[in-house]
């Protein structure tokens, strides 16, 4: 009996140690969106959408393995909410179905190509980080993240090695969108600087704070003619109000993309797809009111004749006693370049993280 008790105690101890090196985090949100189109030829829409993420992290000394699962459920949507919204193409979409470009409902299976292919759980990121001496290593598959100039991309077979040498941060990366990249970063007189040499261009970043105003500069320069993009940002605190102003500029042969505070311009389904040469200017005011965070944003898209767009957005966010967060977003879009995209929308979101 004593041997059994000792064995059980040892097994319990080993299990506890193993579990102590594994963490599970995640999030889930559900959105209801009502969109009221000004055009009489485009039906209003009501959409329920769900998204979930699950992240498993395992550690052993300086080595970490991360698996990130993600999924979206469009099973409650209709062809109206996915295609152009015209009455002629309305068709109920059942779970694990696809919708052709014309909006016609066709049968399909989970994971097949089409608008609804996201109706499943995928391993989005799977990577390992470790250290070899003073060199940090990261290898596997991961998303490089959105920013104000370009959309994110995910690719397998990535490798990064980074270290610090004489006050400079140096990183070599392979497997990104533009093959090999070398980044050198440092800080000079309170200004953080970085330069990235790419296969077909370069990226330059600079940020600092002057008199309580945070300043940011980011440029994506391309070897292709008329394809440079640049972003400027200034933010500060005025009393109880946070103020942020940003401007993204694109030359005539390139397009501003990405999903950031300025807007969702990544060209994906549900995003506001810009055209080459259009610039984006945004201002954000945020404060707290009666336990709520209240944010106002005005976004102006311009610099292409007869295609200016104005977007006004009000966001109210409130933490709930249940541990979830409720967010209400009202948006008004006025687009000079289209007769079918002018619309107001109300989005109600319930989200939880763990």
Image: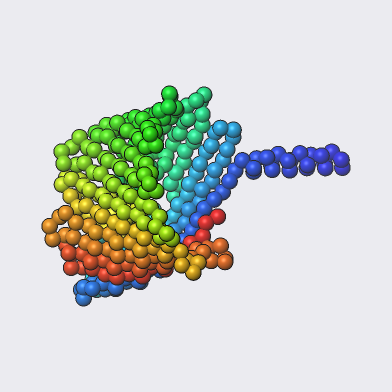
At 33% from the left edge and 61% from the top edge, which residue is drawn? 297
Q: Position of residue 196 (x, y in %)?
A: 32, 33
At 29% from the left edge and 32% from the top edge, which residue is drawn? 198
Direction from residue 238 to residue 258 in the image, left or right: left
Give the number of callouts. 0
In front of the other: 28 or 2: 28
In front of the other: 70 or 262: 262
The answer to whether residue 193 is seen in the rendering is yes
Q: Position of residue 127 (x, y in %)?
A: 47, 38
In front of the other: 175 or 238: 238
Tell me which corner region of the image, top left, top right, bottom left or bottom right, holds residue 327: bottom left
Direction from residue 231 to residue 140 in the image, left or right: right
The answer to whether residue 157 is seen in the rendering is no
Q: Is residue 222 above or below residue 27?
A: above
Residue at the front extreme, as displayed? 211
Q: Quadrant of the N terminus?
A: top right
- Applied colour scheme: rainbow
Residue at the right extreme, as displayed? 1
Residue at the left extreme, as displayed? 305
Q: Position of residue 221 (x, y in %)?
A: 24, 38
Direction from residue 148 to residue 253 in the image, left or right: left
At 26% from the left edge and 49% from the top edge, which residue is drawn? 248
Tell me which corner region of the image, top left, top right, bottom left or bottom right, holds residue 191: top left
Direction from residue 286 to residue 283 in the image, left or right: left
Q: Position of residue 280 (x, y in %)?
A: 24, 54
């Amino acid at each position: 009996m004593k041997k059994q008790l000792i064995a059980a105690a040892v097994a319990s101890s080993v299990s506890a140690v193993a579990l102590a090196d594994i963490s599970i985090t995640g999030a889930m949100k559900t959105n209801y969106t009502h969109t009221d189109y000004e055009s009489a030829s485009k039906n209003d829409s009501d959409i329920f959408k769900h998204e979930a993420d699950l992240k498993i992290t395992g550690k052993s000394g300086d080595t970490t393995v991360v698996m990130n699962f993600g999924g979206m459920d469009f099973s409650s949507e209709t062809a109206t909410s996915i295609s152009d919204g015209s009455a002629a193409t309305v068709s109920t979409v059942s779970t694990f179905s696809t919708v052709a470009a014309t909006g016609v409902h066709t049968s399909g299976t989970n994971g097949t190509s089409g608008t609804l292919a996201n109706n499943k759980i995928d391993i989005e990121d799977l990577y390992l980080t470790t250290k070899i001496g003073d060199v940090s290593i990261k290898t596997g598959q991961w998303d490089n993240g959105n920013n104000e100039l370009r959309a994110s991309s995910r690719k397998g077979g990535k490798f990064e090695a980074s270290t610090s040498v004489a006050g400079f941060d140096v990183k070599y990366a392979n497997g990104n969108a533009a093959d090999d990249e070398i980044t050198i970063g440092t800080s000079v007189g309170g200004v953080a600087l970085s330069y990235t040499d790419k296969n077909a261009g370069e990226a330059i970043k600079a940020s600092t704070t002057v008199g309580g105003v945070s300043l940011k500069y980011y440029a994506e320069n391309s070897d292709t003619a008329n394809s440079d993009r640049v972003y400027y940002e200034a933010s500060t605190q005025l009393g109880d109000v946070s103020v942020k102003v940003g401007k993204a500029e694109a030359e005539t042969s390139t397009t501003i993309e990405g999903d950031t505070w300025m807007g969702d311009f990544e060209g994906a389904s549900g995003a506001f797809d810009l055209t080459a040469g259009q610039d984006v200017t945004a201002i954000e005011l945020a404060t707290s009111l009666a336990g709520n965070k209240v944010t106002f944003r005005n976004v102006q898209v311009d610099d292409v004749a007869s295609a200016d767009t104005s977007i006004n957005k009000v966001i109210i966010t409130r933490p709930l006693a249940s541990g979830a967060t409720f967010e209400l977003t009202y948006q008004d879009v006025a687009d000079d370049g289209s007769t079918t995209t002018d619309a107001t929308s109300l989005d109600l979101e319930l989200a939880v993280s763990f």
